[in-house]
Structure formats: structure tokens, C-alpha cells
Amino acid sequence: MTVNPRLLIDPNKVSVNTQTIVEMCAKHGIEVIGVTKAVCGDPRVALAMLKGGVRGLADARIQNIKRLRSAGIKAPVMLLRSPMLSEIEDVVIYSDVSLNSEPEVLGRLSECALEQGAEHPVILMIDVGEIREGILPANIFRVGEFVRGLKGIRVVGIGTNLACYSGVKPTRENMNLLLATGKELQEILGYRLKVYSGGNSSGLKLIQSGSLPAGINQFRIGESILLGRYIFDSSPIKGTHQDAFTFIAELIELKEKPSQPLGEMGSNTFGDRPEQEKLQIHFRGIAAFGRQDVPPEAVYPVNWLNGNNTEKRKWPGIKVIGATSDHTMLDFGASAGDFGVGSELEFGLEYPGLLAVMTSDYVNKEYVAGGKSYEQN
Ligand SMILES: *Cc1c(COP(=O)(O)O)cnc(C)c1O
């Protein structure tokens, strides 16, 4: 039985995307860690990344790492988000390495690892300008001295994250700052750091251009593997699929209606007044999904456009106008073609869209190979 709305996930396409990106990075001496946080640690997607050649997996949440472990995945897994003090024990048990920036957390990790008779590897995060997580380069001496005295943890590397919150681009300059800070940390610790983790998907263009300074040897890649796109301009990456994930929703109303509301106007439930284009009669549809599943600006209608049904492309024939909690309004223009009530519409996903549909319990997840469904959950 079909349950809508649903998300079609094609792990084979994720594998192909991974392989393309892993090979491209390998040419420049970079190992790739596959990031599963946008798919909530989905084990099938993680396995597809491993098949594509990633050196390990990474996720922001312990819950997702547990999900990977329960599925029997033995590959090394990195915890991306700085640990909460309340989850330190699980961090030592379930992750193989964690990214850290707070001395207090490092202290607790040390105690906890000692209690468990383990040694927990950590990567120290440096803030080279993004003002999200990280130690400021000016403070590396103080933190380095502190960490040197801690037993039970071992600093295996240094890392940074860019273009996530503020949108600072990775450049030769900020990568050099990371390298220089790493060299300083090595001096303080008295041993070599194995990992120089340069960032996320936003680094791919810099890697490909060949201008990444020598010494940076790892990137943690999620979005570009999953969606087959570069970050800043959303352009497709050669040799990857953009439709490893397709969202499907069903039409529950389709009528010719005016494009402007009729009556005295107040603001809507979401506190704004949707702007409608100037009055015209058009085919207007309602699809059975809403903000509880995915924000309307994070999905775009797709269709087979290249004739041989191998890749879906953005399709301007239908416009997403807006949404309430459970209804999404669509503009079909002057003709609705073959569409009618009950038609299934296909949508591609922007990153926030993928994140939302993966997280929504209302969206049925279906795994497909070459368009055919083989499993639901
Ligand atoms: C999310 C995240 C990544 C992966 O980012 P993408 O843009 O999906 O490649 C890498 N590192 C950290 C610390 C993250 O939080």
C-alpha cells in the first residue's frame, strides 16, 4: 500500500555521488568522512556512503550514532557537535572521535574515559572566522597546555567548520590559519597531529581548484554527497545525481480559482499576509503536506525532462505558492494538463527540505533502486 507523503531514497545514487566526491578529494590528498546528520543517521544511506569509499561516518547526534551501531555498522563514527556535559558517557562509548572546543567538556571526557578504561580520541575545533564552534587561534596555547595534562583523551587532530552558520567561505587564507594553529598545537603537545580536518561540503570547490594548502587532509561531507551539489551556487557536481532523494505528495484539490483572496483581510495563522500576484484565474492545487513535513520554500517540483528518464530536473510548470501546517498550495497556471485529484507530484529537496522530511514522522521513507521500491519503513 502506498502511504503519502513519502520520500524515495535511492542508496545506489548516494553511493555513486560518494564515489565521485571521494575520488575527486583523493586526487588532492584529502580523505572524506561521510556526514549522515541530514538523514538522521539512516543506516542504508550510511552503508551507501561506505560503499562509495568514505573513510568513516560522522553525525551531530549521539542518538543517530546509536542508530548506526544498532544496524551493525562497525565503521569509525565521529561525533560532530560538541558534546553536551550530560551525554559524555555515551560519547566515549559510542563515538570513535569527537570534535571539541570547551576545556570543561574535555576534562569530563578525560575523567569518563579513564573510568571506562578507554582512551577517547578528540579533534580540537578552531574558529577561523565563522563564529560558530571553535577555539579562537589566539587562545590555542592556553587550551593546548590544559589538554596536554589530561589523561584518557588523545588529541588526534585539529579542525574547523565554515559556511554553516555565518556563511564564511573556505579560502587559502583561513585554511593556512588552521594549519598554523595546528603546528602551534603540535609544539605544545609534543607530538604530531594526524588529522587536519578542513571543513564541510563548502570546501569542495577550493579542493578541486588545487589551491588548498598542503597539510589539510580531511573533509567532512554531507550535503554534496546527498544532493550532488556545490554549496554556494547549488550547481550540480559532475558525475553525481541530484535526485537520490525525491519527495512525493498527493493532490487533494485542483480547481480553477482566482489568484487573490476575496474578503476583508487579516493576517493568517502564521502571522503574515501572503502576497498574491495580480488577479488571474488559474489552476490551483492543494497537496496533502504542510509545514509539519517540510517548509514550502525547501521543495521544488521536478519532472523527467531529458527524455530518457534518468535524471529529474526542476520543473517550472508548477509553482509552490505557500503552505499552512498540513496544506501546500500550488499554482498550475493556465492548464493542469493530466493532473487531477489523486495525482502524485514529485519534488526535489533543498538541504533544509531534506532535513525536515527525514525528521518528520508523517513522511513515509521508501528505499528504491532504479525507481523501483524495495522496502518501506
Ligand atoms: C554538518 C556538519 C558537517 C557537514 O556539513 P555539510 O554541509 O552537510 O557537508 C561537517 N562538520 C560539522 C562540524 C558539521 O556540523
Image (spheres, rainbow, N blue to C red):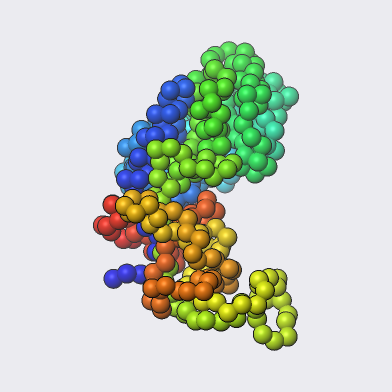
Q: Quadrant of residue 374?
A: bottom left
Q: Is residue 187 above or below residue 221?
A: above
In the image, farthest residue toward the bottom: 263
Depth check: give the residue in front, 129 or 103.
Answer: 129
- 109 vs 364, left or right, is right
x%, y% of residue 283?
51, 76
**Residue appearing at x 66%, y 24% in the figure:** 173
Q: Is residue 179 above or below residue 57?
A: above
Q: Quadrant of residue 179?
A: top right
x%, y% of residue 250?
42, 72
x%, y% of residue 215?
54, 18
Residue 353 visible in the picture: yes
Q: Which quarter of the figure is the C terminus placed in?
A: bottom left
**Residue appearing at x 57%, y 46% in the figure:** 86
x%, y% of residue 221?
48, 37
How many numbered dots are placed on residues in this image? 0
Depth check: give the residue in front, 344 or 106.
Answer: 344
Depth check: give the residue in front, 38 or 95.
Answer: 38
**Residue appearing at x 47%, y 25% in the figure:** 30
**Residue appearing at x 69%, y 86% in the figure:** 263
Q: Which quarter of the figure is the N terminus placed in?
A: bottom left
Residue 66 visible in the picture: no
- 196 vs 337, left or right, is right
